[in-house]
């Protein structure tokens, strides 16, 4: 069910496509056999309001289902870039004419022969062989992508899809989306995708930042972030290192699937149960307060606001602070989130706080899966040959057991918060289960730091090698 990456560079494009492919395979398997007429945006409302648990039998996906999921994902993403009004599909003229009407393996032969003799040394060389087709009908775009899918599965595929997305958005719009249009979209020297490319493919706009909305710098200057909710989200290791702050739009997508960014690579994290994103009453209250605070935070995620902005937050969230606590918070002239949060934890619910006498409400236990599409040596999956065992070059899928203690309990609770992975039950409906006794100490990998930016203080366990985000 995964897209395999053999060379460095295109992970930003491949991981975002992979995230949409998983959305269709896991949460809309019944739609894969249908015509494309309704496909991109009309799927959104069907299951988003109710719990849905996808099958974990990944090997059951047929080749036809996987191919259709890929084509539907590509079409959906291109229309997203085109404001749901248009999609532009870029292919190669030297190949397109040759494979139209041909069948099966003959297409692969035609493409291999054409690519073998294709030399592209400059942008002008590429423009000479580029074919661009515009579509306003999702059905027509789907059929074109389906016919051209061997081209997109060739060594030119990731580049052609990126060009398609940029043209679907419109080059003038892409440049207007960006904060600094003079910077390259693909970074030297290794050809990694910029955040603008990843955001374009996730939300349809080539904005450079991951926070919600836009940040007013004064003097008519703004930094642009994510302005709308998204189908699949984004998490990054850089947030755990305090280099940025991902907003709620990307952290809480419509479906429990996230592109995960590290310093040099993009991978995918996903859950089978939509309930992993559900919040109980206290969590919803916390999210409401945090969102109101972040909306007033002009520090770029620094976690502090002015006294005037603080009073606005209190009004919006109906928090009634005792005068002594209010004076204490406002003494320094600005309010820090961590100090405000401690006050909220100790404030009674009837005053708008989150004080909880049990200390156990909100505990969650669930499974996540991590997919790294880059092909690496896998000794566990070695194949016997006449010369002995040879490591298989393939991507990796890791299952993680995640335990999230209540965010308002003492830090010491973490010592007893671990649960074992494996056969502890695959349904994440166990989020309301009693606290399990730890069978293994918490395991650590950079991915766990990414997960904690979405579920603070989460504890992760897995079997085998640690999941890799590089």
Image (cartoon, grey):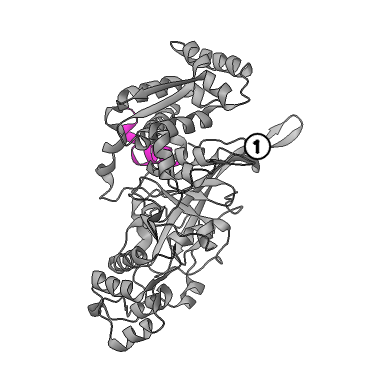
- Asked if the stretch drawn in magenta spans residue 243, the answer is no
Q: Quadrant of residue 364?
A: bottom left
Q: Position of residue 336 (x, y in %)?
A: 42, 75
- The residue stretch that appears in magenta: 19-33
- Asked if the stretch drawn in magenta spans residue 31, the answer is yes
Q: Is residue 354 above or below residue 294?
A: below
Q: Is residue 259 above or below residue 387?
A: below
Residue 155 can be seen in this image: no
Q: As rendered, which of 250 and 187 lies closer to the eye?
A: 187
Q: As rendered, which of 158 and 213 lies closer to the eye?
A: 213
Q: As rendered, which of 356 and 431 lies closer to the eye?
A: 356
Residue at the outermost front position? 219
Q: Is residue 414 above or below residue 136?
A: below
Residue at the outermost right position? 387
Q: As rendered, which of 148 and 118 lies closer to the eye?
A: 118
Instruction: Determine the main secondary structure of the stretch shown in magenta.
Output: helix
In this rendering, position of residue 281 left or right of residue 93: left
């Amino acid at each position: 069910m995964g897209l395999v990456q053999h060379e460095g560079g295109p992970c930003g494009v491949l991981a975002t496509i992979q995230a949409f492919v998983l959305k269709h395979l896991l949460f809309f398997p019944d739609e894969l056999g249908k015509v494309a007429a309704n496909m991109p945006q009309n799927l959104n409302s069907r299951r988003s309001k109710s719990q849905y648990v996808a099958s974990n039998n990944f090997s059951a996906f047929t080749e036809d289902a996987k191919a259709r999921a890929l084509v539907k994902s590509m079409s959906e993403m291109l229309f997203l870039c085109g404001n749901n009004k248009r999609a532009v599909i870029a292919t190669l003229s030297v190949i397109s004419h040759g494979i139209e009407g041909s069948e099966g393996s003959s297409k692969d032969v035609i493409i291999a022969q054409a690519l073998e003799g294709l030399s592209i040394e400059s942008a002008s060389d590429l423009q000479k062989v580029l074919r661009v087709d515009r579509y306003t009908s999702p059905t027509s775009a789907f059929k074109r992508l389906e016919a051209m899918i061997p081209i997109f599965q060739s060594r030119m595929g990731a580049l052609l899809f990126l060009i398609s997305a940029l043209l679907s958005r419109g080059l003038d719009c892409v440049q207007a989306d960006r904060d600094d249009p003079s910077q390259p979209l693909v970074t030297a020297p290794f050809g990694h995708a910029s955040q603008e490319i990843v955001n374009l493919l996730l939300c349809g706009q080539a904005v450079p930042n991951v926070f919600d909305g836009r940040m007013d710098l004064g003097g008519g200057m703004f930094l642009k972030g994510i302005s709308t909710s998204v189908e699949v989200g984004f998490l990054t290791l850089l947030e755990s290192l305090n280099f940025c702050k991902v907003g709620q739009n990307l952290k809480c997508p419509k479906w429990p699937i996230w592109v995960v960014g590290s310093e040099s690579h993009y991978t995918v994290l996903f859950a089978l149960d939509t309930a992993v994103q559900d919040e109980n009453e206290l969590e919803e209250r916390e999210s409401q307060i945090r969102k109101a605070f972040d909306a007033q935070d002009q520090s770029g995620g620094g976690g502090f606001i002015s006294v005037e902005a603080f009073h606005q937050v209190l009004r919006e969230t109906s928090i009634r602070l005792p005068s002594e606590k209010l004076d204490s918070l406002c003494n320094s002239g600005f309010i820090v989130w961590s100090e405000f949060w401690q006050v909220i934890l100790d404030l009674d619910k009837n005053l708008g706080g989150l004080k909880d006498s049990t200390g156990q409400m909100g505990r969650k236990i669930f499974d996540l899966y991590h997919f790294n599409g880059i092909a690496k040596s896998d000794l566990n999956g070695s194949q016997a040959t006449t010369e002995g065992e040879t490591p298989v070059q393939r991507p990796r899928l890791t299952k993680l057991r995640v335990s999230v203690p209540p965010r308002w309990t003492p830090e010491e609770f973490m010592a007893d918060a671990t649960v074992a992975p494996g056969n502890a039950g695959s349904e994440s409906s166990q989020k309301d289960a009693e606290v399990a006794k730890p069978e293994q100490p918490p395991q650590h990998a950079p991915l766990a730091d990414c997960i904690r930016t979405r579920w603070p203080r989460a504890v992760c366990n897995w079997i085998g090698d640690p999941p890799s985000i590089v």
